[in-house]
Image (cartoon, coloured by chain):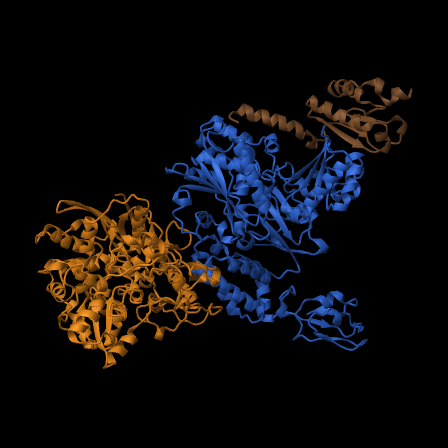
């Protein structure tokens, strides 16, 4: 390494890998239900898809978490998106192919994907 | 030079920048006591005896190493300072074996003097744990008694300065003591026996092994013919044992004293020095002419020889095969003199008075027994002779001057200067020049090789031959010479090496001078001056011109470097294992 | 895709409580559950809460698990890492809120801490240069080399008010400024990592947790003073620190952050590790240099100071690990940021190793000026067992004690010096009412007597005599004259010793004499140890009325000092008793008491 630019490039790349450790209460939280029911319904690929999507878009202010069973097993995989200062939005029967849209519309642009929400699906 | 103005006890002095408080105080005529400090050798500020109050400094400072600053005011004797020194001395005493009445250093012990000066009560206030040590009597030349050691480390510094470094501090805290690597006996480590440690020890912790009782016994034995020889430098130093000024030549009184001690004959090692020169010069010329090993190095100094045997066993061929003057004299006494006077060599006791502790080692070396018995029986230091004279009740200072006995006398100026660094080289050059040119050259002074510098070099043209010479004293410089020979960068032809810095006048067996003198007086130069003055005043200043030398070759050895001379006057060397 | 990081403390404290086994088990279990691509295990440096070790933190949740055992690992993996159910029972209790899990930073232990020197400890993988760089590592060096002249760097450090954290508190900027102008063929930067105070381990933790910070800081110091060569003198007893530092040096070289022409600036700097053999005196700067030179580690008189004639006779800057750990932050965030923390003359933060009678033994970093009370009661969690605070020792064997009446002392260099203590390298040992202050002084003195290098008379002989006088007092043979002589000798040693070790060795005695003189007098006059610690001055006795003659004490006594028939009151033979207290602990009836 011979330049400051090179050092900065290494820093930025390394930083992405370490965003997970930003224990930031101001962050947007994506919580994937990962109880036995959720895993059985395919929550793990969903969880991974979220993690990948967030990393790909370098969203530093987003944390992807798991949680246990919330008691509505038939709607698993269930994903909650918590944007500070906004109502919690719960998505049901999420599949990996829905993840990109949730991230772009909801997390990046602030427009929840209503058709994926549990309310919409239960109707 | 930038000067610093300061005040010592109110006395204004101006000293060069970098001067210590101790030096500034000296300038002001104020003595500050020291124990560990030895100028340029041991500047470690460890004993804390020299503490003083100084403006601008926090707490007390050690005068020996603390530089004065502009406007500094120093107080050397306040109650606070005195009290600190007193507590310090009491602490030292609490670990010191106080057998002062029976100590060889009684009355010239630096600790004793300080305790007296400061009114130390030895109240036992600080009595407590005191480590006990066994005496180290393993080496032939000295005794190490850690029970009397005050850990000033002057010996360690002297040994380090000598590049020998076989003693140092071992362990720590209250258990700290001076020891050898791996706590071995001194005889099992590469100590060169130079005795420089004994010269600087302020107490009786390091002392030469005393052989005077053997001498008294031999003198008292009517069946023994006891002869004594004195090395060139002794005449310039013995007077110090009796309070005479440093550099007083006491040759005549010394001979008188020896005779009064009861020696049957009093010979001069100068005879051996002259003998060494003719043999060594002959050997050198032979090496030059016949492609022998060069450079050739002198072998008079047993400490230096021992060092070479430890560290450069592969280069021992560079050493002249000549025995040292002490051993030559012993060999001649037990062969030529014994035959001439019809005395059985077994009945002769040769005692030598040497400036050197390594001579005690040398007398026991292999291949030093020309008559089948050791050439020299007992080697004493100048200090031991001083004590014998004292014990015998001889009023040394008021003795008349007397002459050495024949036939081993008729010393030359060349032999006298053996006692100083460069002296052997100058003496050898005087003889080599005559031998090679076949003339009696008038110019006998080779001033380039004089002086107390540790390393001197010169180039001389002798009978059309360019001779490059080097003179080294102190093992550090000896090591430099040897490393140059080893790596092939040495272009000298002839080298003089003396173990002790400054040569024999500063030998490890010479009279003790306290640090208060050593730090401010150039002992070596003053003592050497006496020798050069004697040389200048002498009629015969070349070894080969000595009537005694001429006679011994005529009557006994036939010619320089003869087969017989080789058998009696030459020796061999062995590689030595450093650690046993 | 990695979605979770598990940070396990790999500092010496947690390593000794088996954290390496935990990491092994964790990796095995993660593999078993097929989570290898999703969960990353990171071994970090010290978190500070050593009393709770082994500790780990799981991100992104930030769950802090303490006292984790190998058996707990399958549960943590299957419940938390797989299913997202936090294993509440292993959480550090102070992070468990009413209905939420609090961040570690909100706990009492961390709340008042400001982590500057320790900022990366427990946060990054010390063996990964990328993780260091991710948190702006080497940016300070880059900034110095590209934007500042050496003089500017020195000015920034001077303006920050940073003072040496090794004990003396000498202004770091001034030290650099004194060294920089001295011309020499070679100059050196030396990092003093010979942490010797018993109980202090902040330097070890920084080296273990954030070794690159030291490398970066040394390179900055080298640039500032014109040195191209550095040495880190670290104790051989710190194997983890040595290993990580060596990995870090190798990595930094590989990345071109050490070596020739760093970042194309034309500045060369490289460094080496030198191992110390554990002599306390080698923490003294001149002794340390003597040791690096290959000689017996002993101090040398000053002047000449290292700035003029230091390592190998060349101008040298020697800084302590914690001091250096502050440097990159000061460069990046500016001197004003640093000097905004702390008190008037002591800026920034200080790391303390809490030890002794305190709940949270471990490592804390607090702004200068925090009171001792805050440190002990709030951050340290107070004294266990409801005991009363008696005193705290700062500065280890070179320092002194702070008594309860000075509990609200604001900790900084000058306040501590004023009360006869010193900051020292940051050991803080808390003592409760059961501590005998004469015994404590004796304890510290035993240490210095053992560690005295033996070079100068006052320290070599004087400290030994001090200890002997203390032993005389604690064994009940002391006189009032001994107390006077003790004081006289203390002052002598302080004023006359060659180096800091000797000059400060009497401090524990002087300080306890100052604040607890009555305890000394009790030992001498009443032949009593008020705290009941000094064995010669107390005895165990059996209260006959309470003794049921159960013989439990007889059986536990290791020296057969107790006799008596079954169901009859027993007696203790004081001449045989070794005062171990085992009988008192064993007695169910409270029949054995100390007198």
Quadrant assignment, res B2: top left
Nearest the eye: B292 or C541: B292
- Write down the quadrant of residue C83 in the picture: top right
Q: Nearer the viewer, residue B521 or C358?
A: B521
The percent position of residue B236, horizontal first and vertical second, equals: 19, 63
Please say whether residue B243 is visible from this viewpoint.
no
Q: Is B159 on the left or on the right of C322, as rendered?
A: left
Up the image or down, C549 lies above or below B82; here it is below
Q: Look at the picture and state if B2 lies above or below A50.
A: below
Q: Is residue B260 left or right of residue C391?
A: left
Can residue C450 be seen here? yes
Report x, y in % for residue B141.
33, 66
The picture places residue C497, in percent across and down from the top left corner, at 44, 56
* Residue B379 screen position, x and y as percent: 27, 69
Q: Say which chain is orange.
A: B
Q: Quadrant of residue B428?
A: bottom left
The extreme right residue here reads A123
Residue C501 to residue C1: above or below: below
Can you say which quadrant of the picture contains the N terminus of chain B? top left
Figure colour of chain A: brown
> What is the quadrant of the C terminus of chain B in the image?
bottom left
**Which tint was used for chain C?**
blue
């Amino acid at each position: 390494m011979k330049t400051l630019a090179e050092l900065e490039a290494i820093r930025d790349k390394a930083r992405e890998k370490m965003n997970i450790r930003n224990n930031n209460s101001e962050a947007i939280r994506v919580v994937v239900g990962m109880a036995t029911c959720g895993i059985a319904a395919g929550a793990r690929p969903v969880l991974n898809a979220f993690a990948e999507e967030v990393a790909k878009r370098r969203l530093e202010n987003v944390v992807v978490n798991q949680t246990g069973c919330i008691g509505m097993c038939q709607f698993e995989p269930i994903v909650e998106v918590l944007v500070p200062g906004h109502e919690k939005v719960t998505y049901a029967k999420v599949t990996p192919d829905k993840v990109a849209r949730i991230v772009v519309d909801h997390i990046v642009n602030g427009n929840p994907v209503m058709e994926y929400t549990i309310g919409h699906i239960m109707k | 030079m930038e000067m610093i103005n300061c005040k010592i006890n109110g006395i204004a002095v101006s000293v060069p920048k970098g001067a210590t408080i101790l030096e500034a105080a000296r300038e002001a005529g104020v003595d500050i006591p020291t124990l560990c400090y030895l100028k340029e050798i041991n500047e470690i500020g460890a004993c804390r005896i020299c503490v003083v109050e100084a403006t601008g400094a926090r707490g007390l400072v050690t005068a020996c190493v603390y530089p004065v600053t502009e406007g500094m005011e120093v107080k050397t004797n306040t109650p606070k300072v005195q009290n600190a020194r007193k507590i310090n001395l009491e602490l030292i005493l609490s670990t010191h074996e106080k057998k002062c009445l029976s100590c060889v250093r009684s009355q010239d012990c630096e600790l004793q003097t300080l305790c007296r000066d400061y009114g130390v009560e030895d109240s036992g206030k600080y009595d407590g744990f005191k480590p006990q040590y066994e005496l180290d009597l393993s080496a032939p030349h000295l005794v190490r008694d850690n029970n009397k050691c005050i850990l000033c480390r002057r010996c360690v510094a002297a040994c380090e300065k000598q590049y020998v470094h076989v003693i140092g501090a071992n362990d720590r805290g209250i258990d700290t003591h001076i020891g050898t690597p791996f706590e071995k006996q001194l005889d099992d480590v590469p100590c060169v026996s130079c005795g420089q440690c004994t010269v600087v020890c302020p107490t009786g912790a390091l002392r030469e092994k005393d052989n005077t009782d053997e001498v008294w016994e031999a003198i008292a034995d009517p069946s023994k013919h006891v002869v004594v020889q004195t090395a060139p430098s002794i005449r310039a130093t013995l007077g110090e044992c009796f309070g005479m000024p440093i550099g007083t030549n006491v040759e005549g009184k010394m001979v008188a004293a020896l005779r009064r001690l009861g020696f049957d004959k009093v010979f001069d090692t100068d005879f051996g020095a002259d003998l060494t020169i003719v043999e060594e010069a002959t050997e050198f010329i032979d090496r030059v002419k016949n492609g022998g090993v060069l450079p050739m190095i002198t072998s008079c100094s047993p400490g230096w020889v021992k060092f070479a045997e430890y560290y450069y066993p592969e280069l021992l061929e560079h050493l002249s095969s000549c025995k040292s003057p002490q051993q030559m004299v012993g060999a001649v006494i037990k062969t030529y003199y014994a035959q001439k006077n019809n005395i059985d060599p077994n009945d002769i006791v040769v005692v030598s008075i040497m400036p050197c502790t390594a001579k005690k080692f040398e007398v026991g070396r292999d291949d030093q027994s020309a008559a089948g018995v050791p050439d020299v029986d007992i080697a004493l230091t100048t200090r031991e002779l001083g004590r014998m004279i004292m014990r015998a009740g001889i009023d040394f200072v008021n003795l008349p001057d007397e002459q050495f006995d024949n036939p081993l006398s008729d010393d030359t100026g060349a032999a006298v200067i053996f006692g100083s660094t460069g002296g052997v080289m100058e003496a050898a050059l005087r003889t080599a020049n005559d031998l090679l040119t076949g003339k009696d050259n008038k110019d006998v002074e080779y001033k380039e090789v004089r002086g107390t510098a540790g390393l001197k070099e010169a180039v001389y043209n002798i009978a059309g031959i360019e001779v490059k010479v080097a003179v080294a004293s102190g093992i550090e410089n000896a090591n430099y010479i040897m490393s140059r020979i080893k790596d092939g960068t040495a272009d000298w032809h002839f080298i003089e090496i003396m173990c002790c810095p400054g040569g024999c006048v500063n030998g490890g067996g010479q009279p003790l001078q306290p640090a208060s003198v050593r730090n401010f007086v150039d002992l070596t130069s003053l003592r050497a001056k006496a020798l050069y003055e004697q040389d200048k005043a002498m009629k015969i200043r070349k070894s080969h011109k000595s009537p005694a030398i001429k006679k011994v070759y005529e009557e006994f050895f036939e010619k320089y470097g003869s087969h017989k001379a080789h058998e009696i006057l030459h020796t061999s060397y062995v590689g030595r294992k450093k650690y046993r | 895709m990695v979605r979770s990081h598990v940070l396990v403390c790999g500092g010496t404290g947690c390593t000794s409580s088996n954290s390496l086994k935990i990491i092994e088990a964790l990796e095995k279990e993660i593999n078993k559950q097929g989570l290898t691509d999703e969960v990353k295990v990171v071994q970090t440096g010290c978190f500070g809460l050593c009393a709770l070790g082994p500790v780990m933190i799981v991100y992104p949740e930030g769950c802090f698990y303490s006292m984790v055992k190998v058996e707990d690992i399958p549960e943590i993996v299957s419940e938390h890492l797989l299913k997202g159910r936090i294993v509440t029972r292993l959480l550090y209790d102070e992070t468990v809120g009413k209905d939420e899990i609090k961040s570690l930073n909100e706990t009492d232990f961390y709340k008042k801490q400001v982590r500057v020197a320790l900022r990366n400890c427990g946060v990054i993988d010390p063996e990964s240069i990328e993780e260091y760089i991710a948190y702006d590592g080497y940016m300070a060096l880059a900034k110095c080399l590209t934007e500042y002249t050496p003089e500017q760097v020195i000015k920034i450090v001077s303006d920050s008010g940073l003072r040496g954290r090794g004990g003396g508190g000498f202004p770091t900027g001034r030290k650099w400024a004194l060294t920089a102008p001295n011309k020499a063929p070679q100059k050196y930067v030396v990092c003093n990592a010979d942490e010797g105070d018993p109980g202090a381990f902040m330097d070890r933790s920084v080296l273990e947790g954030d070794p690159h910070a030291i490398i970066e800081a040394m390179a900055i110091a080298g640039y500032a003073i014109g040195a191209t060569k550095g040495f880190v003198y670290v104790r051989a007893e710190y194997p983890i620190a040595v290993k990580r530092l060596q990995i870090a040096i190798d990595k930094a070289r590989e990345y071109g952050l050490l070596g020739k022409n760093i970042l194309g600036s034309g500045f060369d700097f490289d460094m080496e590790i030198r191992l110390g053999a554990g002599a306390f005196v080698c923490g003294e700067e001149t002794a340390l240099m003597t040791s690096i030179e290959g000689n017996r580690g002993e101090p040398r008189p000053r002047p000449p100071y290292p700035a003029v004639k230091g390592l190998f006779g060349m101008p040298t800057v020697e800084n302590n690990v914690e001091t250096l750990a502050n440097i990159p932050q000061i460069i990046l965030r500016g001197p004003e940021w640093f000097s905004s923390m702390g008190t008037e003359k002591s800026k920034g933060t200080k790391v303390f190793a809490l030890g002794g009678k305190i709940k949270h033994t471990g490592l804390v970093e607090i702004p200068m000026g925090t009171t001792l009370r805050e440190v002990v009661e709030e951050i340290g969690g107070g004294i266990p067992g409801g005991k009363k605070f008696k005193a705290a020792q700062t500065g280890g064997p070179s320092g002194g004690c702070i008594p309860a009446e000075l509990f609200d002392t604001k900790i900084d260099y000058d306040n501590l010096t004023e009360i006869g203590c010193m900051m020292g390298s940051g050991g803080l040992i808390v003592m409760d009412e059961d501590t005998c202050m004469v015994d404590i002084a004796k304890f510290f003195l035993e240490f210095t007597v053992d560690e005295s290098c033996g070079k100068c008379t006052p320290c070599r002989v004087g400290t030994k005599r001090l200890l002997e006088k203390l032993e005389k007092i604690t064994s009940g043979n002391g006189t009032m004259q001994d107390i006077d002589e003790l004081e006289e000798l203390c002052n002598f040693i302080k004023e006359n010793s060659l180096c800091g070790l000797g000059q400060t060795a009497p401090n524990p005695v002087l300080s306890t004499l100052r604040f607890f003189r009555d305890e000394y007098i009790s030992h001498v006059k009443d032949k009593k140890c008020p705290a009941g610690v000094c064995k010669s001055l107390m005895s165990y006795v059996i209260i006959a009325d309470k003794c049921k003659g159960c013989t439990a004490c007889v059986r536990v006594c290791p020296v057969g000092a107790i006799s008596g028939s079954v169901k009859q009151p027993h007696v203790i033979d004081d001449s045989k008793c070794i005062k171990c207290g085992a009988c008192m602990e064993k007695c169910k009836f409270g029949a054995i008491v100390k007198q």
